[in-house]
Structures are given as structure tokens and as C-alpha cells.
Image (cartoon, rainbow, N blue to C red):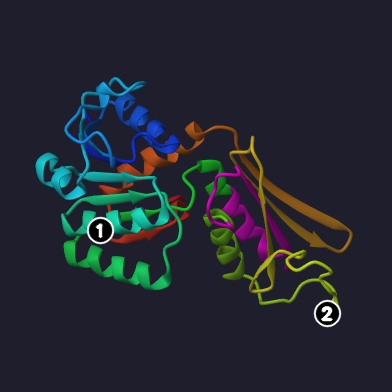
Amino acid sequence: MEKTIKVVIAGPRGRMGREAVKLAEETAHFELVGVVDHKFGGMQLSDLEGFTSNAAIYESMTECFTETNPDVLIDLTTPEIGKKHTRLALEYGVRPVVGTTGFSESDLKELEGLTEQKGIGAIIAPNFAIGAILMMKFSKMAAKYFEDVEILEMHHDQKLDAPSGTGMKTAELIASVRESKQQGHPDETELLPGARGAEFDGIRLHSIRLPGLIAHQEVIFGGNGQSLKIRHDSYNRESFMSGVKFAVEQAMKIDVLVYGLENLME
């Protein structure tokens, strides 16, 4: 029998937060011991429409950690809140599983130091969809043989950051095995600024934001007489939950900071 993992979720009323609550309720060895919300402190989650869990709602993350003594924090909120919650979780000896983007190299260095100091694991993942992780890993493999590549990432029109964390992580993985190259004609001119997309180590990234989309990415490699397309589509937010479950379980087994689920998948 698997050991019960006590879980706290930040932002339970958000679109991803609701799916995380559902995941915690449906996973036998997860126990949802509390949620953190900027409203409704002192109530139970079941007091809110659409929820059945009796987990307590806290407006203060510190109070939540103190009273519930959780093993893991799941944070699928916003970059600034996610950064704050990640640091606080580590300070309280809680293992953070974070799905927000926007962590800088200095942020990651600081968090690495905290995980080492506390001796507990932390996972930050730009994308929790297992298929998206495989798409990134396959793209890294292909980049050893195709040096010309562009990334097209497509998300709903309420997404705040561009390029997406997945798009950036994909570019970083490709760049790690590919020699830097300026793509396109050396004398090309943008008639409209940004027409060629953002640039990372010569790799072009294009961001599309439209209602009706969830999360989609296509990595296009070009070579003489051929092209290779690697694509992943998330059609709903439930697609991310298998990765969240995997991350929570893995966070209990590690004592370092891991950035990207691909580092935990063989």
C-alpha cells in the first residue's frame, strides 16, 4: 500500500486548480489537507459551488502550512505568486510542485540552494502533459540531425506570457545539442517588426493566442528535400494531471530541484 501524501493546492478556483483538486480527490494515496485562496478563508472547499472536498480554505499560505503540515504544495497559479509560494514552501519544509513559468536563472539558483539546505525535493515544470514532455525530448533528439528548426506554440488568448514556458524549454533543449546558427537568408528583412518571431540562439519562436485553443505546439525541422514535424495538442486541462500526479510522487523521492519533467523521465 502506497504511503499517503498530504497535499495543499494553491488557487483551487482557477481552471488548472480545479483539475488539481479533482486529481487529489480521485487519487487514493493523496490527501487534500488544505487549499490557499485569496478569498473565502475560514470556509471549507465544499462551501463553494462545484466542490465536494471538505478541505479547509486558507488565505495565508503560512497559516496553511503551519496548521496542515503537508508533504507537497501544488501551485498552478501565476509566475509571481508561484515564485513566492515556492520559496515559502521550501522554508517550511514542504516539497513544491510548481507549474508556472517565469523563473530566471538566478531564481533557480536560489531555489537550488534552499532545496540543498532543507534536504527536500522541488519540481518546477513548464508543462505537465506527458505528451508535451515527450515532444520536447523527441525534438532534442531530432536537433542532432536537423540544424534548421522553428517552433510554433499556440495557446488560449488569456495566457499572459509569450513565448510559452514549453516553447522556451523546447528551444533550450534544442540549443543544448545544436550549434548556434542564424536561420533564414542573411539579408532577410522584416517588413513588419516581429514577422520572423522571437529568436533564441538562432531558433525562431512564434506565439499564437486565440480563443478556443488550450495548449498546442509544433516543432518544425527542415532539411534538404525533407521536413520533420513534431506536434503535441492538449484539448483540455485534464491532460496535464497525469504529469502533476507523477511530479507529486517523484517530489517525495528526490532531494534536489528539478526543472522540467523530462529530467525525471527515462
Q: Amino acid at mark 1?
A: Asp
Could you tell me which secondary element the residue under label 1 belongs to? loop
C-alpha separation, residue under disc 1 versus residue under disc 2: 47 Å
**Which residue is pictured at 60% across the width and 44% down the height?**
157
Pinpoint residue 95: horizontal percent, then vertical percent: 25, 51
* Residue 144 falls within the magenta-colored stretch: yes
Figure check: 257 above or below 218: below
**Which residue is pictured at 53% across the width and 49% down the height?**
133
Seen as rendered, the residue at the extreme bottom is 187
Q: Which mark is residue 160?
A: none
Pinpoint residue 238: horizontal percent, then vertical percent: 48, 31
Could you tell me which secondary element the residue under label 2 belongs to? loop
Q: Which residues are magenta?
A: 135-163
Pinpoint residue 160: horizontal percent, then vertical percent: 53, 52
Q: In the rendered image, which quarter contains the N terminus?
A: top left
Residue linked to disc 2: 186
Q: Amino acid at mark 2?
A: Pro
Pinpoint residue 93: horizontal percent, then vertical percent: 17, 54
Seen as rendered, the residue at the extreme left is 67
| Mark 2 Cα shell of 10 Å, populated few (<14), some (14-19), many (≥20) | few
Q: Is residue 146 visible?
A: no
| Mark 1 Cα shell of 10 Å, populated few (<14), some (14-19), many (≥20) | some
**Which residue is pictured at 71% across the width and 76% down the height?**
181
In the picture, measured across the screen, residue 92 lies left or right of residue 150, that is left
Q: Earlier in the sequence, mark 1 or mark 2?
A: 2
Residue linked to disc 1: 255
In the picture, measured across the screen, residue 206 lies left or right of residue 226, that is left
Q: Is residue 67 visible?
A: yes
Seen as rendered, the residue at the extreme front is 39
Seen as rendered, the residue at the extreme right is 225
